[in-house]
Image: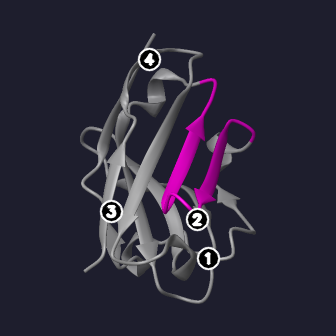
Amino acid sequence: QVQLTESGGGLVQAGGSLRLSCVASGIPVSKLDWAWFRQAPGKGRDFIAAVDRMGTDPKYEDSAKGRFTISRDNVKNTVYLQMNSLKPEATAVYYCAARSGLRVSKIEGEFDYWGQGTQVTVAS
C-alpha cells in the first residue's frame, strides 16, 4: 500500500523560504511520477510543480518558475518542494501526489496517490 506523508509547512514571512517534504512508503519514489499541488481557502486544487520518475523534465506553474524547485532523494525515498521568495498569495494547503503513468502530468485527476497535505501560511 502506497502512503505519502507531507511535512515542512508552517508560518513564514513574505520573502522567506520553506522546504516541503513528501516521504513515500510502499514503493520507491523512482517508480512513480510526482507533483505538488496547493489548495487555497475556498478554491480548487492547483498545480505547482511536477517531475517524472527519472527525476528529469521538471514542470512548473508560471508563478513558481525561478522560485520553486521540485526534487527527489531516492535514498530517503522523499520528494521535496523548495519554495523561495514566498508571497502571501502562496498561503494554502500543499499536497504531494504520485502517479504510475508514463509522462509528467499537471492534471489532478491523473494522480493515483495523495498525501494528507501540509499548511503553508505566508504573512505579509
The reply to whether the C-beta atoms of the residues labelled 3 and 2 are less than 8 Å apart is: no
Badge 1 amino acid: Arg
**Residue at the limit of the structure toward the front, as seen here:** 75
The reply to whether the C-beta atoms of the residues labelled 4 and 1 are less than 8 Å apart is: no
Dot 3: element: strand
Mark 3 and mark 2: Cα distance apart in space: 14 Å
Mark 4 and mark 1: Cα distance apart in space: 31 Å
Q: Residues within 10 Å of mark 4 (few under 14, many from 20)?
A: some
* Residue 79 x/y as whole percent: 52, 56
The reply to whether the C-beta atoms of the residues labelled 3 and 1 are less than 8 Å apart is: no
| Residue identifier under label 2 | 74
Where is 113 relative to 118, above or below? below
Q: Main secondary structure of the magenta part?
A: strand
**Mark earlier in primary sequence (4, 3):** 3
Q: Residues within 10 Å of mark 1 (few under 14, many from 20)?
A: many
Mark 2 and mark 4: Cα distance apart in space: 28 Å
**Along the horizontal axis of the image, is 38 left or right of 34?**
left
Mark 3 and mark 1: Cα distance apart in space: 16 Å
**Dot in front, 1 or 2:** 2
**Mark earlier in primary sequence (3, 2):** 3
| Residue identifier under label 3 | 4
| Residue identifier under label 4 | 12
**Mark earlier in primary sequence (3, 1):** 3
The reply to whether the C-beta atoms of the residues labelled 4 and 3 are less than 8 Å apart is: no
**Dot in front, 4 or 1:** 1
* Residue 5 x/y as whole percent: 31, 55
Provide the residue span drawn in magenta. 66-85
| Residue identifier under label 1 | 53
Mark 4 and mark 3: Cα distance apart in space: 24 Å
Badge 3 amino acid: Leu
Q: Which residue lies at the image location 40% right of the left edge and 78% below the top edge? A: 27
